[in-house]
């Protein structure tokens, strides 16, 4: 019966009838390692080599040494080189990796959560924050612009009333029928405000009298009864309430709808009494002009918000790309070190105790490499001691 050492490949021949059990243990005389002998039912080859009592040592007590006279040793084929056996065993034991590698896990568990958080933040910002911010900014700025513009129009009306009063007191011979003919007075009473606004002057009547306009950009209504405009204006009541409010107050203001040339637009008007006279100075301003400024401001705000959003997306994309590069670089470097240490451990387990450990790192992987190197040296020393003991 021919047997061979599973570690170094040394072959021996023993008689099967000497084995009292189906499985026994033996120690190799070459490498000193233990291996298992399984009893075969068929007889051994007649050309098998028999061992002398000095060439083997059985440890189970089930096998007794054969005398040298019964069999004669014959030359056996030398075992395959150790490097070839190690390579072959390594190829048989190492199976292809089925799970995800460290680099993929670095990317999956580090960059993917970052991208998910960024995407969720972006969705919340675009769907919730931006509309709310746009509405709040628009309303706030619209109110602020209207407040400033209304204050400006009130100041303009009061300033106009003071100038008219001063001019009338300095020209007592100027009568209302000539207000629109006196170029100097006309420059004071009628001024252009913005693109569509203007100032005007009208007279408070005596009780039961008529409200007449004496200075206006439209010469056709100068000297006419202002109540005659009612048939042509659908929102005349709002206009008339503002115009006649100076009967009980020093000034008044408000919004009204005005139709001109078939088009209806929204206007804002403020009026103030000219002290010491029966006249009232007024200022009319088209609200669409202010709303146009508000719309322009809203567009600029949205453009700035969009630019900020694009900048945020660019920064997030650059950050994700940088993080991915760092993780890929570090993951591949760590993976190469681990693969090298795994290969070293496999070769050590197959008996190659001179393989160097090439890992130069001060982290935990470096500590693992040092531990494997110490294990290799310890195994080498232990085998040398065991061989020396067997030779003795």
Image (cartoon, rainbow, N blue to C red):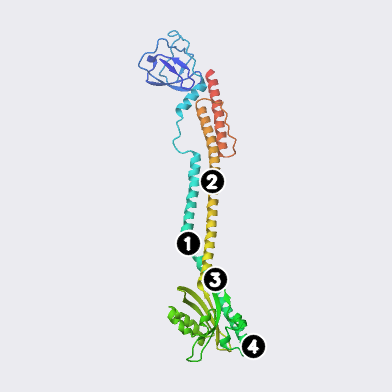
Q: Residue at x 49, y 54 (%)?
A: 122
Residue where numbered disc 4 is placed? 170
Q: Which mark is drawn over residue 131?
A: 1
Q: Which of marks 2 and 3 is nearer the N terminus?
A: 3
Residue furthest top in the image: 69
Q: Which residue is drawn at 54% across and 18% down?
A: 391
Circle nearer the viewer, 1 or 2: 1
Q: Which of marks 4 and 2 is in front?
A: 4
Q: Mark 3 points at which residue?
A: 145
Question: What is the residue that sits farthest to the bottom in this orientation?
Answer: 207
Image location (x, y in percent) of residue 139: 50, 68
Left or right placement of residue 172 versus residue 93 in this view: right
The answer for how far apart the CA atoms under marks 1 and 3 are is 21 Å
Q: Do the residues labelled 1 and 4 touch (CB within 8 Å)?
A: no
Distance of label 4 from label 2 (alpha carbons) = 79 Å
Secondary structure of the residue carrying tag 1 is: helix
Q: Where is residue 147 in the image (x, y as percent from the top left)?
A: 54, 73
Q: Mark 2 points at which residue?
A: 321
Nearest to the observer: residue 364 or residue 140:
140
**First in residue order: circle 1 vs circle 2:** 1
The residue that appears at 52% across and 56% down in the rendered structure is 309
**Image quadrant assignment for residue 184:** bottom right
- Mark 4 Cα shell of 10 Å, populated few (<14), some (14-19), many (≥20): few
Q: Nearer the viewer, mark 1 or mark 4?
A: 4
Query: Residue 206: x percent and y percent?
Result: 51, 91
**Looking at the image, do the residues carrying marks 1 and 2 touch, with CB atoms under 8 Å apart?**
no
Mark 4 and mark 3: span between their CA atoms? 37 Å
């Amino acid at each position: 019966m021919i047997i061979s050492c599973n570690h170094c490949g040394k072959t021996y021949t023993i008689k099967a009838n000497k084995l009292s059990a189906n499985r026994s243990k033996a120690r190799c005389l070459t490498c000193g390692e233990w291996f298992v002998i399984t009893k075969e039912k068929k007889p051994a080859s007649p050309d098998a080599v028999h061992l002398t009592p000095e060439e083997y040592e059985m440890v189970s007590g089930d096998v007794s040494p054969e005398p040298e006279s019964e069999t004669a040793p014959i030359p056996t084929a030398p075992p395959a080189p150790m490097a070839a056996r190690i390579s072959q065993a390594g190829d048989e034991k190492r199976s292809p990796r089925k799970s995800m590698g460290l680099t993929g896990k670095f990317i999956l568990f580090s960059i993917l959560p970052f991208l998910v958080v960024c995407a969720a933040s972006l969705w919340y910002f675009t769907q919730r924050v931006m509309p709310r911010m746009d509405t709040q900014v628009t309303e706030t700025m619209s109110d602020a612009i209207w407040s400033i513009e209304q204050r400006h129009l009130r100041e303009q009306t009061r300033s106009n009333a003071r100038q008219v009063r001063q001019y009338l007191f300095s020209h007592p011979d100027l009568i209302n029928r000539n207000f629109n003919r006196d170029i100097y007075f006309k420059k004071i009473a009628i001024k252009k405000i913005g693109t569509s606004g203007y100032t005007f002057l009208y007279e408070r009547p005596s009780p039961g009298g008529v409200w007449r306009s004496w200075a206006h950009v439209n010469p056709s209504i100068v000297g006419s009864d202002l109540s005659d405009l009612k048939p042509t204006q659908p929102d005349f009541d709002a206009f008339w309430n503002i115009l006649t409010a100076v009967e009980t107050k020093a000034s008044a203001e408000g919004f009204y709808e005005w139709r001109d040339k078939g088009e209806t637009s929204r206007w804002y008007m403020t009026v103030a009494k000219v002290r010491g006279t029966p006249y009232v100075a007024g200022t009319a301003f088209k609200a669409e002009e202010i709303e146009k400024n508000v719309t322009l401001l809203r567009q600029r705000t949205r453009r700035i918000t969009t630019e900020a959003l694009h900048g945020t997306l660019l920064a997030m994309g650059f950050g994700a790309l940088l993080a991915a590069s760092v993780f890929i670089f570090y993951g591949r470097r760590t993976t190469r070190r681990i693969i090298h240490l795994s290969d070293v451990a496999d070769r050590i387990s197959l008996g190659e105790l001179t393989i160097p450990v090439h890992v130069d790192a001060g982290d935990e992987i470096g500590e693992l490499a040092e531990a494997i190197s110490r294990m290799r040296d310890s195994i080498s020393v232990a085998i040398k001691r065991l061989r020396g003991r067997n030779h003795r």
